[in-house]
Image (cartoon, rainbow, N blue to C red):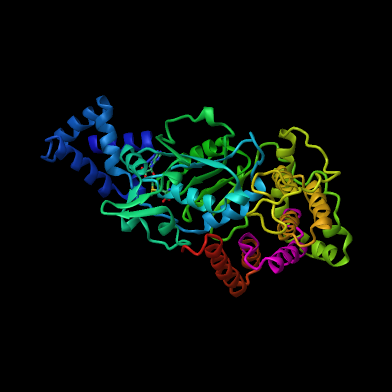
Amino acid sequence: MALERIKALLQEVIGLHPGSIGDASIERAIHHRMKALGLAAMGARNERIYLRRIQQDKNEFDELVEEVVVPETWFFRNVFPFEALVSYLPGLKHQGAGERKTKILSLPCSTGEEPYSIAMVLMEEALSVGDFSIDAHDVSQRAIRKAKRAIYGQHSFREEYRGLRDRYFQRTRAGYVLDASVKAKVAFSRANIITDDFDHKRSTYDVIFCRNLLIYFDRPTQARVLKKLHRMLKPGGILCVGHAEAAQVTRDYFSPLDFSMAFAFSKVGEGSEIFADGPPPGNRFFTQDGDTLKDLQSTFHDLVGLVEKDRAFGRRLSRAAPAAKAPTALPPPKKKTPAKTRKGQQPADGSGPLEQVSTYLQLGRLKEAATLCENYLKQNPQSETAYYYLGLVGLRQGSVGAAESLLKKALYLDPAHHQALGQLALLAEKRGDAAQAADYRRRQKRAMRRHAGGKE
Ligand SMILES: C[S@@+](CC[C@H](N)C(=O)[O-])C[C@H]1O[C@@H](n2cnc3c(N)ncnc32)[C@H](O)[C@@H]1O
């Protein structure tokens, strides 16, 4: 029967499983297109004509695709993955002139709200996240066109998020017009995850957002798509899916990350030698101090999953990266601190020793990162940034107790340290202390507002 063959064609080309949106919706879309072509009268004959038409005319097939896809999306849809990015990326980023930027993929991007949300959040965190670019694809040409135009109605703003709408959009008669600086961060193009091979994009992305797409596919198609995404991710890269899709993510290829409600996974399965050589040799903060050692030991077993992922990631990156010099000596202190640099903060030009710490963190060279921080603290004992980075080292080593006290130390030195607040909120969430987590989140929001100049 022609109608069934049309549905099968849709499934073959864009993956749409009829059960996902229902036969009735697909048939409505087909009949809508038939009507547009003057084939209004129902019946098997016209359906056969329409089947022949879409087999021969790619444009008409694309029109049918436009009719059946569900482009539903909005800014900061389920905010947790965006929060997780902010927490995760500082450890991933590559810094320094000429080095690569963080590469992100949003697929499907629909009308652009998702990739633009990522861009805004990361622009807010430029200091800790560094430079980045986003590729965004969708099978719908109409959606891509709207995304490039970047003018949105009220309906696209269903979640309040840090007042970013007021900061990055101009309200006009036509709608909310997105700032050019955000648009410049996202490259849109039409692509079909089912038929495009993406082989040229092997190991390209640090982060992939693929949310609310797998739900439209059957199991075998989901598995094929997840394999493709796995290939496109860099080792240690992260994948965010929609909340209804997390259960479908193959554990052979991905391992769940510890960010509650973010539905985030890290890439595994390519030469990971998890915990092959034991914990790294210690630093003052993590293994010589009696209390922190106890912390490390008592939390070690609970956190094996997290540690495994982070260390395997670190080793894979280290292997791929050129050897970096050991941080035996600090660069000579700078004579002048840039006007906008607060105490203990690295200069924004990326030249400070804490920039080097960040690079070590991203390379998984935790011992070197910690040594550099400790040396830095000898000269700058009030550096909240050094304590914050040491806290990140602690987290990556699985020393949660020590990490938490270091993050609190950063917070003590700078009560508006929003990244430290974010990490502390995540730790509180992880141990199930919802009230404490909510308190940190409230403070983080306040700090973010202040950080952004009170423009929220
Ligand atoms: C519900 S939206 C999700 C948008 C966004 N990721 C979000 O979560 O808000 C689903 C999108 O998937 C796109 N889509 C469906 N099949 C696709 C395919 N085979 N390749 C690429 N995009 C596809 C649709 O055009 C639609 O815009």
> Which quarter of the figure has residue 404?
bottom right
Q: Is residue 377 left or right of residue 179?
A: right
Q: Which quadrant does ligand 1 occupy?
A: top left
Residue 83, placed above or below residue 145: below
Please report the residue visible at 67 percent of the width from the left and 65 percent of the height from the top. Answer: 414
Q: Main secondary structure of the magenta part?
A: helix
Please report the residue visible at 62 percent of the width from the left and 73 percent of the height from the top. Answer: 436
The answer to if 411 sits in the magenta stretch is yes
Residue 303, placed above or below residue 68: below
Q: Position of residue 136 (x, y in %)?
A: 44, 40
| Residue 4 visible somewhere in the drawing | no
Q: Position of residue 91 (x, y in %)?
A: 67, 49
Q: How many marks?
A: 0
Q: Position of residue 47 (x, y in %)?
A: 18, 35
Please report the residue visible at 15 percent of the width from the left and 38 percent of the height from the top. Answer: 36
Residue reaching furthest bottom? 435
Q: Is residue 229 left or right of residue 308?
A: left
Residue 79, placed above or below residue 278: below
Q: Which residues are magenta?
A: 395-421
Quarter holding the N terminus is top left
- Foreground of the two, 350 or 88: 350
> Which quarter of the figure has residue 11?
top left
- Foreground of the two, 337 or 126: 337
- Foreground of the two, 372 or 224: 372
